[in-house]
Image: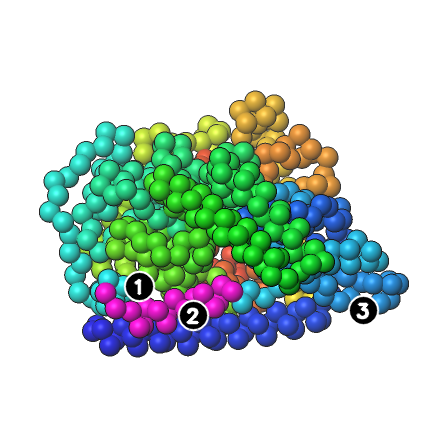
Amino acid sequence: MSGSDALKTLAEQRRLLQLEYDNEKQSYSKITEKIGLSRLAERGDAWIDIRIGRTYYNSLNQRIVEVFREVSNDDDHHFEFGRPVAFIVTEGDPGSKPKIAFTGSVSVVDGERMAIVIPDSAIVSRLQEAYSAAVMLSFDETTYRTMFEAIDRCVNAKGRLAELRDLLYSKRKVSELALPPMRFSYLNQSQEDGVNKVLRAKDVAIVHGPPGTGKTTTLVEAINETLRRESQVMVCAQSNMAVDWISEKLVDRGIHVLRIGNPAKVNDKMHSFTYEHKFEAHPDYPTLWSIRKAIRELQSTKRKGSDQWHQKMDRLRGRATELEIRINNDLFNTAHVIACTLTGSANRVLSGMKFSTLFIDEAAQALEAACLIPMRRAGRVILAGDHCQLPPTVKCFEAMKQGLGRSLMERLVENHPEAVKLLTTQYRMNEEIMKFSSYWFYGGEMKASEDAKYRGILDLDTPIEWIDTAEMIKEVSEEGSESDDMRAYRDALAGNSFGRINKEEAQLTILTLQNYINRIGKQRFLDERLDIGLISPYRAQVRYLRQLVKRLSFFKPFRHAISINTVDGFQGQERDIIVISLVRSNEDGDIGFLRDLRRMNVAMTRARMKLLIIGDSTTLCRHPFYRKLKGYIERLNE
């Protein structure tokens, strides 16, 4: 592929991204018009009946308002740093039509508290005086605009970015430096090879880390060794949570990290290496704060507009700018790693900055255009992740079908196999849980470490079981039940197209888990601090499973040890016992997005010692993946 072919590929990416943008904007408008605030709250896109806390200016001179969610229904929500929001008020009586009071963006979410950046002109009293107030997510124009700009910049690039573009979008072999291999006694052979692959790369290298293979360990060591040769690197990931994870591991390694943007999970350790915290802790900050306060007071004086007023304002602003530059220089000059999300790399505080090496973690979960955002700052690019696990989120079916869901990592693995190092030793799963995933997704190359190989809870227990609801339907049928009974274990829409649900299967899932805990022994379960993950691909099923666990007194002693979430919610996590409710059961053999096998790979490989799959084989096994998985499990249980 030539340079002109690279430009055609990027033009196609822009077209598909435009499709996604148009589709999401249109869908957002329809949803917000039709379903109302209470339904948005159920979806995790709104907080309703909020209480307003204090209003203040943060260390970055942004005006902040605190909001509190009075009633938590334990549901997940989609609020996180940088997401745009709108404040909705109902003024007067309850029958009044809700109106947008003003907009803002999320700064921090901490449990039931959220800090939101708002304009100086926003009238907070409107929220306090309204009959009711809510905050809802707005359509995210900024992220799309940043991705479009990144594509355009890449298309029009000169110099190093143009060289990288033409190489990455071609099949021309990447070149490596002739360095002797380094040895690391605490890494296995494939991890050691991965670090050496990174160190030798002139342009690009890829660390492909299947589940449990120590991808983060390898990446941290590669970053540490790179910093022996370079003074500073940039580390990015798609989500705030992924940035936090790699940042925390780097800090544990003794590496000085400056985190641009706020962490997804607020705690003292995470907060201490954020840009905002370090800015506030700088010795010059109290002086800067005083000057900013004087500027705000001067702006509100009656003599605004006089020559004397302008002169004083100019002096104060000049001094404030001087102090901001000095603080920023100190923060950036002492940091070894600048860490942020892919879109966060466009932050104005990074203006003009360049890095010899850019590391992108969880690269397979990011849209291709998002990976291009930080590339303008880099001399070479290192990607880490697994394109056989969660793909980028694409909501437009047409855009997905035409290739928008294909990540840059996936493209590079195909174009540049010589730049890829697959990590092959996994430390998480019992070998029999691992084997099917290894066979289907990784060419059978994965092997279990000695510590993980025979990991288990009960003697003579098979690590994987499939509880087949089709067999139960068959039993009901043979007993001659009426057609109402025949609908048992069938999936259905959970009202207003809120996703699929299978209540009978959910109840069976809970009963299966209860029986397994009894087999282990309640006291032993608590003494050994075992933990459980209940996973379903469907959010409606997750909500129902949460209700069942909350309702049943049996689970009261174990609730702290049980996590219930979608596949996406479990990415990067692991549990001793994983129970998967697959939901789909129908006469048409329709398995919906269970056809995306990468999500199933994630779900199955969360388990350390026991994997329980609940599903209808009659529906699912029309697909070859589930048919072979069922056969594999049956052979294990013979």
Q: Which residue is mark 1?
A: 411
Name the residue tied to disc 2: 148
Q: Mark 2 touching mark 3, by CB under 8 A?
A: no
Which residue is painted at 69% across and 48% down in the image?
55
The picture places residue 550, in percent across and down from the top left corner, at 70, 41
Q: Is residue 7 left or right of residue 506?
A: left
Quarter holding residue 556: top right
When asked about the image quadrant of residue 450, the answer is top left
Viewer-nearest residue: 620 or 434: 434
Left or right for 591, reference 304: left
Q: Quadrant of the N terminus?
A: bottom left
Q: Residue at x 25, y 54 (%)?
A: 380
Q: Which residues are magenta?
A: 142-159
In the image, 296 versus 332, the foreground residue is 296
Whichever of labels 2 and 3 marks the residue nearer the N terminus, that label is 3
Per the image, the residue denoted by label 3 is: 97
How far is the residue under mark 2 from the one under mark 3? 36 Å
In magenta stretch: residue 280: no
Residue that sits furthest to the front in the current view: 308
Label 2 crowding class (10 Å Cα cut-off): few <14, some 14-19, many 20+?
many
- For mark 1, give the secondary structure: helix
Q: Main secondary structure of the magenta part?
A: helix
Give the mark, 1 or 2, whose residue is nearer the N terminus.
Answer: 2
Amino acid on which disc 1 is placed: Arg
- Distance of label 1 from label 3 (alpha carbons): 49 Å
Residue 278 appearing in the image: yes
